[in-house]
Image (cartoon, rainbow, N blue to C red):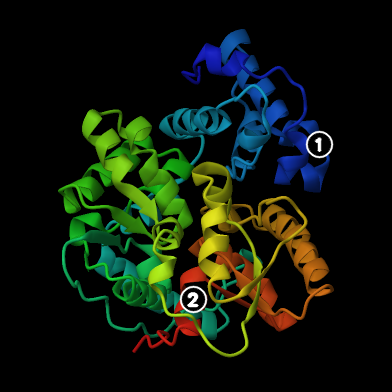
Amino acid sequence: MLDLDPEKLSACVSCGLCLPHCPTFRVTGEEAYSPRGRIDAMRGVELEGAPVDDQFVEFMETCVQCRGCEPACPSNVEFGALMEQTRASLAASNKTAPWWQRIAMRALGHHRLLLAGSSLLAVAQRARLVPKRLGVSRLPLRRPAPVVPTGDEAWLFTGCVMDAWQRSTHRRTAALLGAAGVTFQVPGSAGACCGALHVHAGLHQNAVRRAELTMQSMPGDAPVVVNSAGCGASMKEYGSIVGTQSARDFAARVVDVNEFLAGRVERFATPVGQRPVVIVQDPCHLRHVQRIDADVRTLLGHVADVIELDDQGLCCGAGGAFAALQPELASDIRDRKLAAIDRAMSHADATLISSANPGCSMHLEAAATERGLRVAHPVDIVAEALGLGDTD
């Protein structure tokens, strides 16, 4: 048994409108790799006593959890909740999330260990000891200094992977907050990881613990600004993940950095000179879960000309740790995204791609660099255009 809600399972009427929005169905063409097919498999186990065999586990593990099916669903099926509960049940029975993955997830909450491990991984990359099939872009050997708090009007969540691999984006976020006249503070060591990757892996109790520590690290009622789309989406769902009123209250304070700055864009100077041309790639957890992709256009539009992709926000294949756990499938999905980028480039002279999530940007960058493309966070692009790009 998967402990799934029968009402949520029965909400799917198998209409198939989700199929074009499912990245694994698009690259495989197989029904079992679609939301409709996966829900049918869930029903078989939960309602009909079908076995949780290797094939069932494969169907669940190969879901990117992009949740692109949810906005397309006329029945409002909560596919994300169904998949997360299924993953949690499988992990609890040790059918998924092997020991090495659990150890890696545990390390995310120990920031000094994570920083040291990231540096070692960067060295191993340069020694060509990291397989290219994992699709990991070039990691930094050195990092700029951490951001320095300036006041208490907001919290700037720095997290785990973002601070280890993209700290320069934190510094540019801090610069833009300052330009908008907003002071901020940063959480202590307890807020080292929000638990988003634990949710993806089905490690529910670990995710709850990380969420509780994150909430404790940012008390009060100031807004919590997050510049990682995946982290922000998870933190906005702490109410359902943790299940307490305090978690719901905290979740209401969480705001994506694009959302926060778009409402203050008039406070920025107007840049002079030629405007950069930017192709926008929407991370799934920003477009399909938080549904604030319009704010990215508002923020970028202040300094750049925005070029849209024609794939209706189809997933890039990163999906938390999906690119590392399912490299071949993730690569196939990424190829479709790169094809959409190529089509956009054919209509505009653009070599700059915007992506507001570390997993997406690194997954794309691993393949885009050889094409002469650069992938950057919207914050990086705006800060650079405003002359706030110093990360030393």
In this rendering, position of residue 270 left or right of residue 223: right
Quadrant containing the C terminus in the rendered view:
bottom left
Residue at the image point whose x is 54% and y is 12% from the top? 7
Secondary element at image label 2: helix
In this rendering, position of residue 98 left or right of residue 343: left
> Above or below — where is 338 with respect to 268?
above
Residue at the image point whose x is 60% and y is 65% from the top? 363
User: Can the viewer see residue 39?
Assistant: yes
Q: Earlier in the sequence, mark 1 or mark 2?
A: 1
Secondary element at image label 1: loop
Q: CA distance from mark 1 to mark 2?
A: 41 Å
Q: In this figure, which residue is indicated by the disc labeled 1? A: 30
Q: Amino acid at mark 1?
A: Glu
Q: In this figure, which residue is indicated by the disc labeled 2? A: 382
Residue 96 in percent (x, y) is at 51, 39
In this view, the residue in front, 67 or 64, is 67
Give the foreground label among 1 and 2: 2
